[in-house]
């Protein structure tokens, strides 16, 4: 009987039935907010580790990398 009902459904109905039977997945970010680091601390870090002749593009790349991946700061703090 169930096969007769599914066989008589239009293609759209069969596709919708298939979609509703598929399990759903939801992912949420587990990272917290970026730590409150002042510009003076960030500037001192860049100057001490890379020198005063570092280009602006590299500094911005480091800043954006730290913004996106805060675990880098956790790894550095643990060592």
Image (spheres, rainbow, N blue to C red):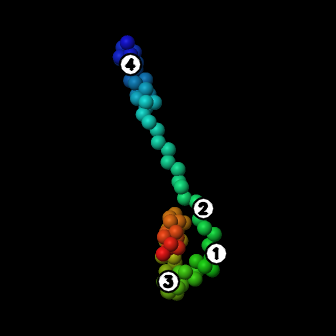
Residue at (53, 65) in percent of width and height: 70
User: For this rendering, which residue is in front, 78 or 7?
Assistant: 78
* Image location of residue 36, percent across then percent down: 63, 69
- Are circles 1 and 3 on residues that touch, CB within 8 Å? no
Image vertical order of residue 18 relative to residue 50, above or below: above
Which residue matches tag 2? Answer: 33
> In which quadrant will I find the N terminus?
top left
Q: Secondary structure at mark 4?
A: helix
Residue at (35, 16) in percent of width and height: 3
Report the side of 78 relative to 11 (left or right): right
* Image location of residue 59, percent across then percent down: 51, 76
Residue 38's label in the rendered image is 1
Q: Is residue 62 visible?
A: no
Q: Secondary structure at mark 2?
A: loop
Could you tell me how far apart the alpha carbons at marks 3 and 4 are, in whole angstroms?
67 Å
Could you tell me how far apart the alpha carbons at marks 4 and 2 are, in whole angstroms?
50 Å
Residue 6's label in the rendered image is 4
Residue 68's label in the rendered image is none
Could you tell me how far apart the alpha carbons at marks 1 and 4 are, in whole angstroms?
63 Å
Residue at (60, 61) in percent of width and height: 33
Which residue matches tag 3? Answer: 49
Q: Nearer the viewer, mark 4 or mark 2?
A: 2
Residue at (58, 80) in percent of width and height: 43
Could you tell me how far apart the alpha carbons at marks 1 and 3 are, in whole angstroms?
17 Å
Could you tell me how far apart the alpha carbons at marks 2 and 1 are, in whole angstroms?
15 Å
* Image location of residue 6, percent across then percent down: 38, 18
């Amino acid at each position: 009987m169930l096969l007769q009902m599914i066989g008589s459904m239009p293609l759209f109905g069969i596709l919708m039935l298939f979609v509703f039977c598929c399990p759903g997945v939801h992912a949420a970010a587990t990272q917290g907010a970026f730590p409150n680091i002042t510009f003076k601390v960030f500037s001192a870090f860049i100057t001490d580790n890379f020198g005063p002749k570092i280009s602006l593009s590299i500094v911005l790349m480091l800043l954006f990398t730290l913004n996106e991946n805060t675990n880098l700061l956790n790894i550095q703090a643990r060592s």
